[in-house]
Structures are given as C-alpha cells and as structure tokens.
Amino acid sequence: MLKIPAKAVTTNFKAYALDDLELRAEAPSIFSPGPMTGVSNRYAFVPTAEIVHALRERDWVPVWVEQQRVRNEARRGFQKHLIRFRRSEQMQTLDEWNPELVLTNSHDASCAYVLQVGIFRRICSNGLVVSDDSFEAIRFRHAGLKPESVVEAGFRILDFVPRLGGLIDRFRNRTLADHESVDFAARALLLRYDSLDQAPVEPATLLTARRVEDQANDLWTTFSRVQENLVRGGLSDGRRARSGRARSVRSLRGIDSRVSLNKGLWQIAEDLAAARN
C-alpha cells in the first residue's frame, strides 16, 4: 500500500531575511572567532560572518541556514555550514521559482568556500542546487582569501539567471512518456542507493505527487517531485526489510549528500531534456 507523507500542501512562500541572532541560533559555526585548533599555518581564517556581512551590503540576504552534525566534539563550532541567499529585491515575490546563491564553508579546514547556483521552488518550499555542468561551482581557498572576492563572484549568478530560466523552460516543455518518467526515477534512486533492489521503494513510487500542482508529466514537474521525495523522504510502498519491517525513503539531512543528490538529479534532467521524445 502506497503511503504519502503528511503535510503535502502548497506553500505560498515569501522569503524572510535572517538576522545574525537567527543565524547564530541555527549555525553557531558561522561566527567562530577563529579556526579549529591544529589547522595548517597556511590556513588563512576568514569568518563566514564577515562574508555574510559583505553580501548583505550588496543586497544578498540570507534566507536559510544549517550546519553539519558532528561526531568529533573537537569540530563542534567549526563544522561545515550552508547558507542560502536571495536578492533583496526578490524578497516579497511569489514567483514559482527564485534564483539563489548557495554558500558553504567550514572553519575546520575540511572544505573551501564554495558558491553555487540554487533555486527555491515556492510550491514545495524546497531548495535545489544546479549541477556543475550548468554553472560551475566557484571555490575559494582560504589562503589569501578576501571577502570582496566572494561577493563579486556572487554577482556571476545574476548573469546566469536568464540561462537558468531558459533551462527550466526547456524542462517544462519536455513531456515525458510513462517509461521515461519511470526511467528518470530509477536513475534518481541510484543516486542514493547502490542498486534498485536495495532501494526501499519501486521507481514508480518515487513519482508520487504530494499535491495537485505536481501531477503533470513534464520534465520540470517530474524532476521536482522526485527531488522532493528523495530529500524529504517518508514514502513507502510495501517493500520490506529481511526482518519483515516495512521500508520507507528516509529524509536526507547531510549537507554534502543533499547537494550531491541535487546536482545529480539536475544532470539527469539535462540529459533527458537533450534527448529526443
């Protein structure tokens, strides 16, 4: 029996700019006063808070934040964090999708500063990340980094927005046959699981729409509901583990795993958009 997660409702999302108190509450590592003890002498510490301040001055405001969970207590307060930014002039729009700037960093030398193109899809209140083939992620080494360099790079995203809109229109105009939708879902499952046999649900189950607006068979809608189902989880269709327990798609919580999944899904969608009907 197919189980559809609760709270499958449409959200009319208006962005809400986060202040420093809210950022600190959700991701204290943004405000680390220095790097984690033991990092290389070549590591130049540039606090994420300084980048946030510089971006705000150029009308990029934070609308979402999270930090990575840690097992090693020595990394607590320095771990990887992710912040999504939106242009201030877009804060009160109700567009079906909005371009965003996605910034990731850490203060434990585990990663560089990375800027990526993001999309916020209003109807499902869900954030996407575009594949590197569409817009290459911009990476900054900590050595010699200046906040202004990150801010200036952020404006490359504005130059990319018309192309991003063109790609989404291309997805919208590509109608999928039933077998293409199932094949898309199967390839999507393989981004999370080693094989379809190990997946907790059948590929067709991943196509389940959580709301009426997501029942169309175009590539954009199909991509969106598959992405949401893989990230939010909660779907089950009767598959059982060896113990007999019913299996379901678990929510995807890790920053790296979600970004990687998003990029993989986007690439599959681009491949399918380029293929003939």
Image: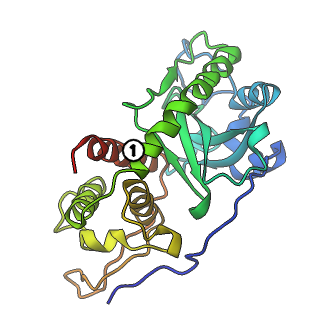
Q: Which residue is mark 1?
A: 260
Quadrant position of residue 177:
bottom left
In percent of width and height, residue 100 lies at: 62, 39
Q: Residue at x 56, y 17 (%)?
A: 43
Nearer the observer, 42 or 216 = 216
Answer above or below: position of 106 versus 169: above
Q: Residue at x 71, y 34 (%)?
A: 32
In percent of width and height, residue 116 lies at: 52, 33
Location of the N terminus (image quadrant): bottom left
Q: Residue at x 43, y 69 (%)?
A: 233
Give the left or right position of residue 207, taking residue 177 as reference: right
Looking at numbered disc 1 in the image, what kind of residue is underneath it? Ser
Answer above or below: position of 14 versus 79: below
Q: Residues within 10 Å of mark 1 (few under 14, many from 20)?
A: some
Answer above or below: position of 102 versus 9: above
Residue farthest along the top direction in this orientation: 144
Give the left or right position of residue 30, taking residue 166 as reference: right
In percent of width and height, residue 225 lies at: 43, 63
Give the left or right position of residue 243, taking residue 235 as reference: left
In percent of width and height, residue 64 lies at: 67, 49
Asked whether the viewer can see residue 183, the reply is: yes
Q: How is the image coloured?
A: rainbow
User: Which element is circle 1 on?
Assistant: helix
Give the left or right position of residue 188, taking residue 90 as reference: left
Nearer the observer, 4 or 140 = 4
Question: Tag count in the figure?
Answer: 1
